[in-house]
Each structure stands twice: as structure tokens, then as C-alpha cells.
Amino acid sequence: MSNSTLKFLGSDSGFGDNNNSAYIEIDNKLIIIDCGITVFNNLKKKFNFNKYKDIKVIITHLHNDHAGSLSQFILYLWHIFNKKAKVLSACKNIKEYLKITGTPDEAYTLVNIDTNIQFIETEHVKELDCYGFQLKINDKTILYTGDTKTLNPFLPYIKNSNELYVDVSKNGGVHLKFDDIVQDLQKIKQNGTDVYLMHIDDKEYIAKKSNGEFEIK
């Protein structure tokens, strides 16, 4: 049984069946991390949104596998449940993105500063500004890379984090190549931070290489 603070709706890479997306439930609050193309249907199946007074969606960047059903989800909450989503993001074009996907301003609140979250800009693709974040929730501090091809922006935050959720892949490129960072992740774990692998392109390969040392979401 996983002890991770974050639970996952899916942990596949962009071409997988279930886009990488996580969530946290706290009392009558729901926090969702990323809302890719496949996520809306998974959300509909899993949650009764009537029970939540506060629904937040953290968006790391605007690739379709991370924001492709965000508009649909906001509209669903607005029209079906009469609820206004709170969107937390540092992406410079998110307002325009929501506008061109038909999301009225009154259906959501956009926040780029929150006392419990610090966005961390990282490198993924040249076409988009991309972010991970550090999130303080209850007595835990979570470090979440989003999609990244380097660990460097996150290194200053690791020692103060209880859990690291890290994007890994078999082949690398615009994502972290697992073989290249496995020793770094081992050191991070040895120093007391729990490490969870996500956004995976080849789970069989990563599981074999991980050899049970890290939990695969």
C-alpha cells in the first residue's frame, strides 16, 4: 500500500492511455494536478463534486496531455455543479489558452501566487514555459517536477521536501532519462526524501531498471 501523499489518476507519458495526473483530498477540498486529454473522463468517474467546497487545479504547462481537458472540466463544474474552479498556474499563456478553448472568465479563478505553493520554472520544450512546484500540504512538503529534462532547478528544494515526484523516461530527450539520473535519485532517497516515478513512457523498462527501489505511480 502506497504511503504517498499524492494519488494518481494516471501516470503515462503523453502518448499513453492515461495522462499523468495526481490529486489530493483534504476534508472538503480537492486539489488536482494537471488535466490532460484523458483526465476529464477519469475525474467524472471517480469523484462526486457536490461534496467539495473548494476545487483547485494546478497546471504545470500547456501540452495537451497536461491541460487538454482543463476547459472541459471547468465548464463541467460550472454548468453541472454550479462550482467555480480555482486554476493555479504560472504559465504565461494560460488565460489565452482558456479563452480560445471557450472558457468564460466567470467560470474560474486564475491564481499564480498561493501561500502553499511555489512554482519552479524548468526546461522541457522551447515552445512552452514549463513549471514544477513545491507544495506544502498538512505536515508534508511535496516536490513535483512536472515535465522536465533537468533536475537542476529542483535541487535547492529537495533537502526541505518529504516527497519527490519525478518525470522519468526510457529514452530521455525532453524528459529525464532514467538511466542518467538513477544514481541521483538513489542519493536523494538515502538522504530521507521519498522518491516516486511518474509520467512514464515504458513502465516495464523502468520497473526493471528500478528493481523495486522506487515506487512507480
Image (cartoon, rainbow, N blue to C red):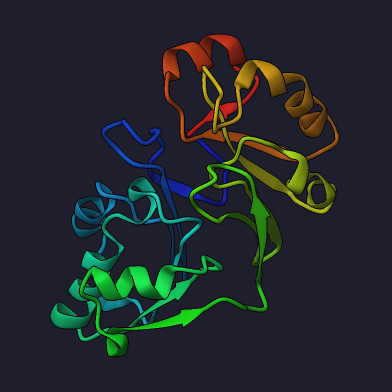
Above or below 209: residue 2: below
Q: Residue furthest bottom?
A: 106
Q: Position of residue 89 (x, y in %)?
A: 51, 68
Q: Return the residue nearer the eye: 118 or 136.
A: 118
Q: Residue at x 26, y 58 (%)?
A: 69
Q: Position of residue 83 (x, y in %)?
A: 27, 84
Q: Residue at x 61, y 46 (%)?
A: 145
Above or below 207: residue 145: below
Q: Can the viewer see residue 211? A: no
Q: Can the viewer see residue 153? A: yes
The reply, left or right, for residue 158 in relation to residue 118 is right
Q: Position of residue 78 (x, y in %)?
A: 21, 81
Q: Residue at x 31, y 31 (%)?
A: 16
The reply, left or right, for residue 160 in relation to residue 58 is right
Q: Return the residue nearer the eye: 191 or 85.
A: 85
Residue 56, picture quadrant: bottom left
Q: Return the residue nearer the eye: 105 or 17.
A: 105
Q: Residue at x 71, y 23 (%)?
A: 181
Above or below 177: residue 167: below
Q: How many marks?
A: 0
Residue 51, picture quadrant: bottom left
Q: Position of residue 76 (x, y in %)?
A: 18, 72
Q: Residue furthest front?
A: 127
Q: Residue furthest left?
A: 80
The reply, left or right, for residue 4 in relation to residue 187 is left
